[in-house]
Image (cartoon, coloured by chain):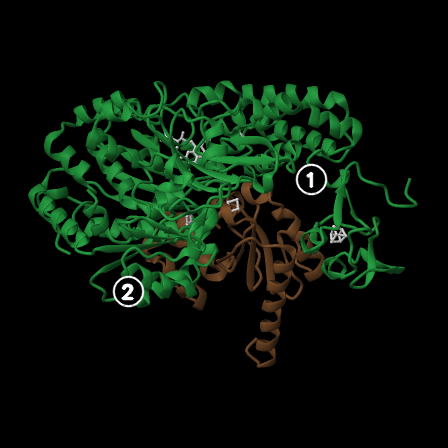
Amino acid sequence: MEATGHPEMTEPASEIEREVEDLIGKWAGNPSKTIMAMLAVQEKYNWLPQEALEYISIRLGVPKGQIYHIATFYKVFSLVQRGKHILQLCTGTGCYILGSALLAKTLDKRHGIPWNGTSDDGLFTLESVNCIGACSMGPVLVVDGEYHANVTHDRVDALVKRLRKRANKEENNGEA
Amino acid sequence: MEKLRSIEQFKLFQDKCRREFEEYPLVISVCQGASCRAAGSEEVANVFEKLTTGSSDIRFIKSGCQGFCEYGPLSVVRPANIFYHMVKPGDVTDIMRSTKEEDEVVDRLLYTHPGTGEKLGREHEIEFYSKQHRIVLALNGYVDPLRIDDYLAHGGYSALAKALQVMEPGHIIEEMIEANLRGRGGAGYPAGWKWKSCKEAPGDRRHIICNADEGDPGAFMDQAVLEGNPHSVIEGMLIGAYAIGGTNGYIYIRHEYPQAVKTFSAALDKARELGLLGDNILGTDFSFDIDMTFGAGSFVCGESSALMRSLDGQVGEPRDKFTHATEKGFHDEPTTLNNVETWANVPHIINKGAKWFRGIGTEGSPGTKVFSLVGKVNNTGLIEVPMGTSLREIVYDIGGGIKKDGKFKAVQTGGPSGGMLPESKLNLPVDFDALTDAGSMMGSGGMIVMDEHTCVVDVAKYFIDFLIDESCGKCLPCREGLRQMSKILHRICDGQGKLKDINDLEELAETVAATALCGLGKSAPNPVLSSIKYFRDEYTAHIVEHKCPGGVCQSLISYHIVPDLCNGCGECEEACASLAIHSVRRQKRKEGLLREIDQTLCDKCGACVQICKENAVEKRSPAVAPAGAA
Ligand SMILES: Cc1cc2nc3c(=O)[nH]c(=O)nc-3n(C[C@H](O)[C@H](O)[C@H](O)COP(=O)(O)O)c2cc1C
Ligand code: SF4
Ligand code: SF4
Ligand code: FES
Ligand code: FES
């Protein structure tokens, strides 16, 4: 389906549409803000749910095909659900020559968190990020937006163990 | 805050800011740049904040990157310039106490000269700083980027006021041409000429863009300016807009810099509140504002024509260069696009004049350049040096030489578009033309130092693979040529290469460089060509001896535990996620049984090397084949 011609007259109909409206309503009818709208949605949900993209398409007046083209062209976007915790290993040049990429092996083999993938329990997604500007403290691991400096196999291991333990506890307390 | 409605009002307000700032006898700053934050400087700042709120003698400042990132978190006490490094939250009370006493310093937090062992208490005594010339970074560490008053107190927006009050737009452009400020984003095109052709192009609207995509995957110069002194960029853009007749302003920031986004956005708000952005700026007929857009993780979008598409909410594919952006750029209208550091230089040139600017740097490349100096040097961080400074001065004097007394192998300038330069090129000056002649590139300021434990073939492979990922895929040479090159490089790193591969690589590289559409493809071969040119023997070592001289390429190395060094602690066994380490029967050591690595199980992750306190794990190249395999 192509975008309808009346982005301004669209009304949010579902819960998710209402949430997305709050984020992108200010850009109604302005296709040049498509990437900004998609970034806002991804920031909220950690990925791009289809329903949200359809709403952006109508509200901003951008063909759906173009939205999917953008979603695959730009690296940050994810069309599949990501884990609860996002691990980003810096593979910028500074961190890379300090051996950052090797750390992924421990995450994969010991914790079942594959490179560019999500662990089976849905807790962790591991991705690479290009230089976040903390090269002097490399290798750098970003965990849910928080920077961890000078990480080693050992420290990565401890970090994931800690997060997993906390998650198990929460689950036992029924908080999921 | 009240809007400032005239230049006179502005000057009065600026004086007030200056007086208020000077009322504090002491200023303490804590760096909040990315490295310092990663090292815990936010916690340090929190403690300072608690202890200084309401103080009338101490102004506390959370600053942008102060440069010496290696030793973060940093804190500097001014006016004495006492430099504290690796500060922890628990150190704050001691700093506060000795700051209030005259002539007292916290000895344990001072930087020690690695050669002489002398404690150096003042910022300017440290070679890392004393050899720099800071213009763009001058206020990093002196101002709170979230307070426009601080910038004004240090003379901020004076250049704009001067431009509006006493300079005709044409006069500004002449001054810029005379200064010969060359674009700091990589290509080095003179900003003044760009401005002139944009001004002269027909059209009702003119777009002014700041390129803050900073795509080089190992560099953070622009981040430091955006986070440390955002108003200098805004002021530069305002002056440019006034000179060119710019009507619409944009900044394109990569979203991977959330702190820069936050700081810059706050700076824009403050500038609007004061009437420095918006309609009738300082009561004149000049109106201009800046809209912020985020990059979404695409290197090619740093290329100017791709950026303009992305700015419009589209996929960022470059277009051919036959159309000049200055005439037909954003929305096919006249557009001036400059890099963050380029814009940040502008207020200084307007304040002090083209002649002053040309007095710094070299004839062909005046001014300074900011570099992010990282990798295997002792003093990593952000530096600003006059153009013409030699690579040797940067690596050895400012950078303090190679980490762990290692041996220098190469320095990469220009990121993925640049080249690797060997020891014999260390006397080269940093200058747009000199670096290009040597097969590298100035680029935007990334500088990666490599030591003997780095593999140049591996780094070349890394860059090519990065560029394959980032190529928009529109043109065949870039898409297919890079893929072919990557295949060959992988083959060599896997020990499957043939000598002919080196020549094939060179040929492919030259074809891609000659036929790709945009700068990404055109410059992509540089890391490969330069590493072959200067380190051909490393390529042949991989191919003929199956040896990786840097000890990096996984197929060509193996890990071994040296029986004489192992103390049997078993930490490596615990650290090994591949369960490749086991104890050797009857071989007692101080802490337990000797350990051994099963080569068939080893995944070559290096965890055992990191954990072993006895340095008993060694790497060998060529790899020793697993027992039983032939
Ligand atoms: C693939 C590619 C990536 C680029 N990335 C950047 C970048 O991240 N930042 C930047 O300022 N310039 C980048 N450039 C250079 C821009 O195209 C442009 O030359 C520059 O921003 C112009 O500003 P300047 O003249 O002030 O340097 C890139 C160029 C290419 C070909
Ligand atoms: S050289 Fe590469 S990135 Fe540039 S336009 Fe061609 S395919 Fe795209
Ligand atoms: S290199 Fe990694 S996989 Fe190999 S023995 Fe050491 S820890 Fe185990
Ligand atoms: S390369 Fe990792 S933070 Fe810069
Ligand atoms: S981040 Fe603090 S000095 Fe660079």
Residue B52: which numbered mark, if any? Answer: 2
For residue A68, side relative to residue B585 (left or right): left
Position of B608 with respect to B463 (left or right) is: right
Q: Secondary structure at mark 2?
A: helix
Viewer-proximal residue among B293 and B450:
B450
Query: Which residue is situated farthest in the bottom direction here?
Result: A173
Chain to which mark 1 belongs? B
Q: In which quadrant of the rendered view does residue B433 lie? A: top left
Which residue is at 77% across, 61% downward? B570
Counting residues from the N terminus, which is met first, the one under dot 2 or under dot 1? Answer: 2
CA neighbours of label 1 inside 10 A, class few (<14), some (14 to 19), many (20+)? many
Under mark 2, the amino acid is Thr
The foreground one among B443 and B564 is B564
- Residue A52's place in the image compared with B542, above or below, is below
Q: Position of residue A162 (x, y in %)?
A: 60, 68
Q: Does residue B406 sit above or below B72 in this rendering?
A: above
Residue B541 makes an appearance in the image: yes
Tell me if residue B280 can be seen: no
Residue at image x 67%, y 29%?
B484
- Label 1 sits on what residue type? Val
According to the rendering, which colour does chain B have? Answer: green
Question: At 54% from the left edge and 31% from the top edge, which residue is drawn?
Answer: B411
Local SS, label 1: loop
- Residue at the spot of label 1: B552
